[in-house]
Image (cartoon, grey):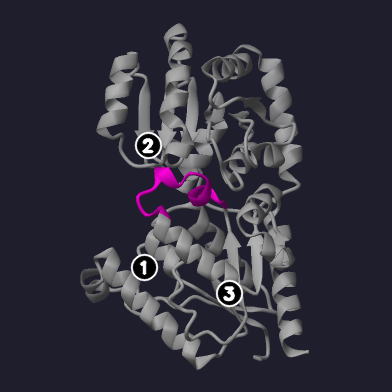
């Protein structure tokens, strides 16, 4: 064992995502450990295009690397090869896998940690063309893990439905928001707008259904706009839907920086989170932090994270969606009450708690290994 416990992190999520909640979670853990004197973190990287780790040490973050490793497939292969070299050296105490491809299992002799963010592939396999492959890989990693971190009680319960025999390996550790410092954004935004953040195309995100439910609200409020942040440009299906609903000139997509996302939350009338299922719901915390009222689904983990601070609707009921959203728009007193509760709810989900609980689990695993 090294002088300070050393955690070797797996880079595969950083090849899968350029942006995204899972890669941000692992970035936060690594940066949190780097700021402490009692643990070490290592992320083997030849080259990555992930936004959050753009300033991390990378062997080929130069013109040659950016040209040679332009394709995701090549980049992923070389990063995994480099990681396997580090695993074989065995100069670490714990390996924390960031996703489910089990390429590391044949070489790994140290304890394995896996974080389960959700069970959406298992619960909605028909929504994904690669569901059979991902579920099989996930099963292999779960069954070989020494510790499984579930990011909510809901996720733990869903995990146990599929893998009841791993209960004694599960620890629930909530996400938390780390303090962020960046130059404030001062973009000119619409005076009144509703906000949606993140991916829109996955079926469980329920985006199109929500937009159809919101269309009458937009029609009744000529000054009201709808902004989508992230998720890429609108696709042909979305554009056709907006046109059919008569809201094409009322809805905009923005690829926002972190600073601009904070500004969007601060200035939005409210943030809408219509997912059928999530494993945690980090965007709700972002909204709470920025004083933005939240209207969200009453399903999966969202009431667990939102508590009394969010206003809830049934995500499969357009009348419920309309009533909840219109109620916040039309009742500033109720909206401000939810905002105040949001600040209080946020205190339950600090990054300091997330990091400390994760490190405690690492330490316990190391003690069990070497006692």
- The image shows residue 347 at horizontal and vertical percentages of 75, 46
Residue at image x 64%, y 91%?
2
**Does residue 143 lie above or below 155 as drawn?**
below
Residue at image x 67%, y 30%? 310
Callouts 1 and 2 close, C-beta under 8 Å: no
Alpha carbons under labels 2 and 3: distance apart: 41 Å
- Residue 155's x, y, as percent? 64, 51
Query: In this view of the protein, which residue sits in the foreground, 210 or 270?
Result: 210
Name which residue lies at 43% across and 76% down: 103
* Label 2 SS: strand
- Are the two marked residues, 2 and 3, in contact with CB atoms closer than 8 angstroms? no
Magenta highlight on residue 123: yes
Alpha-carbon distance for marks 1 and 2? 24 Å
Provide the residue designation for mark 3: 144
Left/right of residue 321 with respect to residue 254 in the rendered view: right
**Secondary structure category for the residue under label 1:** loop
The C terminus lies in quadrant: bottom right
Foreground disc of the pair 1, 2? 1
Q: Is residue 185 visible?
A: no
Observer-nearest of 287 and 183: 287
Q: Is residue 33 above or below residue 315?
A: below
Please rate how many residues cluster around mark 2, counting C-alpha atoms within 10 Å: few if below 14, some from 14 to 19, many from 20. Answer: some
Residue 254, numbered circle: 2
3 or 1: tag closer to the N-terminus: 1
Q: Does residue 133 appear anywhere in the picture? A: yes
Whichever of labels 2 and 3 marks the residue nearer the N terminus, that label is 3
Instruction: Answer left or right for 160 relative to 202.
Output: right
Q: Which residue is mark 1?
A: 48
As displayed, is residue 187 above or below residue 90?
above
Relative image position of residue 275 (x, y in whole percent): 53, 35
């Amino acid at each position: 064992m090294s002088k300070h416990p050393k955690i070797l992190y797996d880079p595969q999520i950083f090849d899968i995502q350029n942006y995204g909640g899972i890669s941000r979670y692992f970035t936060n853990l690594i940066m949190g450990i780097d700021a402490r004197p009692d643990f070490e973190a290592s992320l083997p990287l030849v080259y990555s295009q992930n936004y959050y780790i753009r300033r991390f040490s990378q062997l080929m973050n130069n013109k040659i690397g950016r040209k040679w490793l332009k394709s995701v497939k090549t980049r992923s292969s070389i990063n995994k090869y480099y990681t396997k070299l580090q695993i074989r050296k065995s100069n670490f105490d714990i390996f924390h896998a960031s996703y489910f491809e089990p390429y590391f299992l044949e070489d790994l002799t140290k304890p394995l940690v896996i974080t389960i963010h959700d069970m959406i592939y298992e619960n909605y396999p028909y929504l994904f063309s690669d569901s059979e492959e991902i579920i099989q890989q996930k099963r292999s990693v779960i069954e070989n893990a020494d510790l499984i971190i579930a990011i909510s009680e809901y996720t733990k319960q869903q995990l146990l439905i599929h893998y009841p025999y791993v209960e004694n390996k599960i620890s629930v550790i909530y996400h938390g928001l780390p303090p962020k410092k960046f130059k404030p954004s001062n973009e000119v935004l619409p005076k009144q707008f509703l906000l949606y953040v993140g991916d829109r195309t996955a079926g469980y995100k329920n985006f199109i259904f929500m937009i159809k439910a919101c269309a009458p609200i937009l029609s009744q409020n000529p000054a009201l706009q709808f902004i989508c942040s992230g998720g890429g440009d609108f696709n042909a299906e979305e554009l056709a839907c907006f046109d059919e609903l008569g809201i094409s000139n009322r809805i905009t997509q923005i690829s926002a920086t972190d600073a601009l996302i904070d500004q969007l939350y601060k200035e939005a009338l409210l943030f809408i989170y219509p997912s059928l299922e999530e494993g945690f719901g980090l965007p709700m915390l972002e909204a709470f932090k920025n004083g933005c009222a939240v209207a969200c689904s009453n399903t999966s983990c969202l009431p667990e994270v939102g508590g009394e601070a969010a206003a809830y609707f049934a995500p499969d009921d357009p009348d419920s969606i309309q009533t909840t959203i219109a109620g916040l728009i039309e009742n500033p007193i109720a909206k401000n009450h939810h905002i105040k509760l949001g600040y209080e709810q946020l205190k339950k989900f600090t990054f300091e708690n997330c990091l400390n609980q994760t490190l405690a689990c690492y330490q316990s695993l190391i003690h069990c290994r070497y006692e």
